Each structure stands twice: as structure tokens, then as C-alpha cells.
Amino acid sequence: MEIGIVGLPLAGKTTIFNALTRSQAQTAGYSSGRCEVHTAVVDVPDPRVDILSEMFHPRKTTRAKIQFNDISGITGKGQGSNGGGLDAQVLTALSKSDALLQVVRAFASEQGIDQEGIDPQRDWEALQLDLLISDLAIVERRIERIEAGMKKARADEAAALQRELALMRRFAEALEANTPIRDLDMTEEEQTLIRGFQFLTAKPSMVVFNAAENDGHITDLDWVHAHKQTSALVLKGALEMEIAQMPPEDMQLFLEEYGLAEPGLNALVRECYRLLGLMSFFTVGEDEVRAWTVRQGATAVEAAGAIHSDLARGFIRAEVISYDDMIACGTMAQARSQGKLRLEGKQYIVQDGDILNIRFNV
């Protein structure tokens, strides 16, 4: 799963990227409007993995992962006003993302961009404008092609084109009213139909308000949460980047000194994971304790396929125990003796934190 980090120039998105990924990407000079992409894969913080590792003492511990792509090139100046949408390189980079992490400046800048004051809502709306206009450009081109195609379409094709045309016109109306596509109600058929377009405003969005260390927290985020598949939080980006670069022992001392249980970035990564509709199940043993990623609502056979296609193809049963029951029992032997392990079939809906052992035959 990939999350694209976007923001207006000087919003501090590369600072957030560095903090998230413990990278040292250059944070200056990223306001030129050029498309550049920095990429890193990060672990999803999950204390359950640590506890299971302490319990089973495996040779290897593997966490769930998410890829973050720091994408420059959005200016917030309505780049789509010429009808072309975003720069092709920027659009390609963003289209590959499963979700967007939108960084909004909530700190005073030393680079002369505060003439109109600090206004996170204004800046977020400016960022949305580029995404909205880019989607609108795609929708309008598609409408033109459908209308041209309907003139020579067979009767059986015309009905499908008519349904798509109605949907695209509904998108155009919403986008012109500054409404993102993810706010619209759609059927499963319509969601499948638009999947190939990779509309930017249809993607789940995480909004991060980047505040200074001594700034008070922004408390009113309701105007962001009012949008569907959209979440928001406040982070002190520069401080989080400093914490992320510390050696583990220094980081722990710093967190204890400030009364923090963990870096704020951990909550951000977990929220991105949730926003993508993902969850983790575990496999455990002497060789490895591992967190596997599946979509929420995945079946046992889908979880088996996440491990290896052979396990899905030859699936017989899944031996399942919940994480809480495993911790309460302490050992697999106790779990079996207490009847906490159960056998489930292909259609069992895997729950977050389930520990699975797949029985299969190929």
C-alpha cells in the first residue's frame, strides 16, 4: 500500500516525510514546482507484535509495512485552470497512491509567506483546488469521449455508456461545486467502474496540520472530518523529525521526560493504515512472528493468499485464536487445553489481531 504525501510549498511535508521514515531528504528548495518523489517503506507500529515476539522468542520478527511517497510539484495556484490538470509527472505519481497524506502549514514561516496570516483552512482549500481541477479535467475529457462514442455505439453498448455518462456528469457537477468525489454516495458497480481513473479526490485522505513546537493545538477539526474517508490530526513536524533521528535510548528518555507514551507519528501511521481499510492478522512460531496486512472484512482464504498463493489454493481450514485469548492463555498448549483454538472455513471473516495457522494441501 502506498500513501502519497502532498502539500503546498513550504508546508513542511518533507519534514513530515523525514520524521515518518527517519530519512534525511532535503527540506529546502522543494517549492520550485518541479515534480520530485522521495520514497520509503515504514513499519506499522503495533505493540502486539512486540508482545507476541516476547512470548514466542522467534528467530525473526516482521511487522506490517506502508510505503510513503513524498511528492512535490503542487503549487495551490489552480494548475488545472488551463484545462490540463496537474503536471503529468505529478499526476502519475499521485495516481499510484492508495491514499493521500495532505500536509497543511500551521506554523509561522520565516520565508515571507505570512503576509495574509496563518490560515490552515485557507491553505487546505487551496491544496484541494488543484486536486479538484485535475479530476474535473479528466471527467470532462471522458464526457466528451462518451458522447462521441454513443453516436456509433450498438444498442447493448449504448445503455452502459449512458450510465457512465450520467455518473461522469454527476462528478462534474460535484467537482465544480468544490465537492470531492469521495463525498458522493456510489454503488459497488460505480466504484468498480471508476477504479481505473484513479481520481485524486476519490482517494482516502489524511490531513496533517504541521504546527511549531511551541504552538497551541488546533482544536477545531470538524470541518475536515465532515468529509467522507477523511481524517485529521495535528503534529509538531520539526519536533517529530528531531525525535525520529534520535538513537532509540535517547528517544525513550526524551519521551519519558515529556510524559509521552510514543512519538505522535506512531498514531499517524496507524490512522493511515485504518483509513486505507486495512488490518493485521498474525502468524507465530519459533521461526517468525509476523504481521500480515489484509483489508477489513477479508475472509480466511484471502488471508491465506496474503501469506502465499499455495495456501489459498490448497486451503483446508484455518486454526484461529484471537490475540486477547492468546495473551490470556500464555502458550499455545494452554490455548488448546482451554479450547480457545478453533477451526474456521474459507468464508470466516478474519478479525483484527487474529492469530492464524493455515492448514492446506496442494
Image: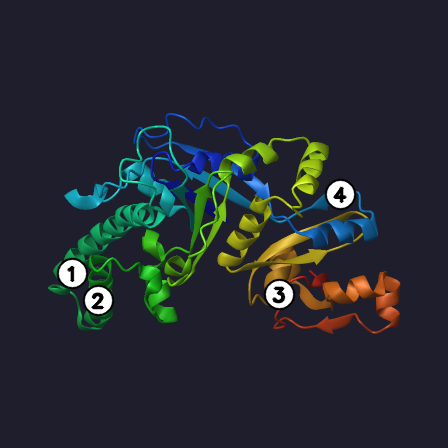
Q: Is residue 160 left or right of residue 269?
A: left
Residue under the point 54% across and 46% down: 66
Q: Quadrant of the C terminus?
A: bottom right
- Residue 282, image quadrant: bottom right
Q: Residue beneath label 1, please?
A: 149
Residue under the point 59% across and 47% down: 266
> Which of disc 2 and disc 3 is earlier in sequence?
2
Q: Residue beneath label 4, please?
A: 60
- The amino acid type found where label 2 is placed reads Leu
Q: What x and y, as percent, mark residue 81?
A: 17, 45
Tell me the CA gap for discs 2 and 1: 8 Å
> Which of disc 1 and disc 3 is earlier in sequence?
1
Disc number for residue 204: none
Q: Residue beneath label 2, please?
A: 161
Whether tag 3 and tag 1 are in contact, CB under 8 A, the answer is no
In the image, which is nearer the foreground, mark 4 or mark 2? 4
Tell me the CA gap for discs 4 and 2: 53 Å
Disc 4 secondary structure class: strand
In the image, which is nearer the foreground, mark 4 or mark 1? 4
> Which of disc 2 and disc 4 is earlier in sequence?
4
Disc 2 secondary structure class: helix
Q: Mark 1: few, some, or many residues within 10 Å (few <14, many ≥20)?
A: some
Residue under the point 51% across and 41% down: 236
Tell me the CA gap for discs 4 and 1: 56 Å
Q: Residue beneath label 3, please?
A: 301
- The amino acid type found where label 1 is placed reads Gly
- The amino acid type found where label 4 is placed reads Lys
Disc 1 secondary structure class: helix
Whether tag 2 and tag 1 are in contact, CB under 8 A, the answer is yes
Question: In this view of the protein, can residue 97 be seen by the observer?
Answer: no
